Amino acid sequence: MSHKTATTETVVLELLQPQWPAPNGVRATFTTRIGGHSVAPYDSLNLGDHVGDAPQAVSANRSALAQSMGARPVFLQQVHGVQVAHLDHNTPDGTQADACITTERAVACTIMVADCLPVLFTNRLGSVVAAAHAGWRGLAGGVLEAVFERFSLSAQVNTAQAATNSIANDVIAWLGPCIGPQAFEVGAEVREAFVAHDAAAAGLFMPSAQAGKWLADLPGLARQRLVALGLNPQTQLFGNDGSAAWCTVSNPSRFFSHRRDAARLGGSGRMAACIWRV
């Protein structure tokens, strides 16, 4: 991750810039909690309008983000599902989906998170971009696979790829910050859902100190799914490697975390991962 500050008329936002070989004409960013108008416990760049924050603060934060990007972020109503929305300039905020894709310019595929994993995608031509909200339910349900299905309809692929409906060689992905493998305690049913899909997923769960619980490696599970779709982990997958710097729970000064703060502080803000064509 690299860091960028974006100055608006009233605030300075701290934004993280993905380090990946995105093509010319594609931009991406990940917001932190730093820079914004919200007060505790949503301080200060909260982008979620459903978490109890003052609506005027959320609106000001979203406007500041759009100004810094030079594009319109489309904020979805995320429900931990696998629906993929196709965005254009008329797509309203609040569209229900947990992933989105677009070929339009200046329309940003945007995913809000506060522990779940955001995954950004582009094809190598930069003609299509997409984003997915990969909490454990969406990930187990196939949200990444659903994005790939939409890429097969939207991406410009060569004749050989079209003949096989394969887009794996044409896509790169970036995994953003999320709850880390030392903090994501889950029940046995979560482990069983992933192992039923792929027995190798068992290696991404470690026994927790609490009986019957497991520590899950969410970015590792997402990488495993993407590799199964045909992406090369060395040349097509970038970002979150499960280390502490990427953990939303472990970095309270930089990241919101629902699991860390909702019960203790009464609420938590939301960050956003955005990708768009210029």
Image (cartoon, helix red, strand yellow):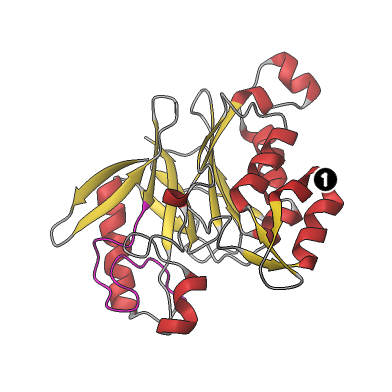
Q: Position of residue 2 (x, y in %)?
A: 32, 39
In-image side of 30 versus 152 (left or right):
left
Residue drawn at the location 59% of the way across and 48% of the way down: 219
Judge by depth and name the residue closer to the eye, 17 or 150. 17
In-image side of 34 versus 175 (left or right):
left
Q: Specify whether residue 187 is in view.
A: yes
Quadrant of the image containing the C terminus: top left
Quadrant of the image containing the N terminus: top left
Tell me: residue 56, above or below residue 150.
below
Magenta region includes residue 56: no
Q: Residues within 10 Å of mark 1 (few under 14, many from 20)?
A: few
Which range is magenta? 31-50
Judge by depth and name the residue closer to the eye, 221 or 126. 221
Q: Position of residue 31 (x, y in %)?
A: 36, 54
Residue drawn at the location 53% of the way across and 42% of the way down: 241
Q: Residue furthest front?
A: 209
Magenta region includes residue 49: yes
Q: Position of residue 167 (x, y in %)?
A: 68, 27
- Magenta residues: mostly which secondary structure? loop
The residue that label 1 is drawn on is 198
Q: Residue furthest left?
A: 9
- Secondary structure under badge 1? loop
The picture quadrant where one finds residue 9 is bottom left
Tell me: residue 186, above or below residue 226.
below
The amino acid beneath tag 1 is: Asp
Residue drawn at the location 40% of the way across and 33% of the way down: 19
The picture quadrant where one finds residue 235 is top right
Tell me: residue 266, above or below residue 182.
below
Q: Position of residue 238 (x, y in %)?
A: 51, 35
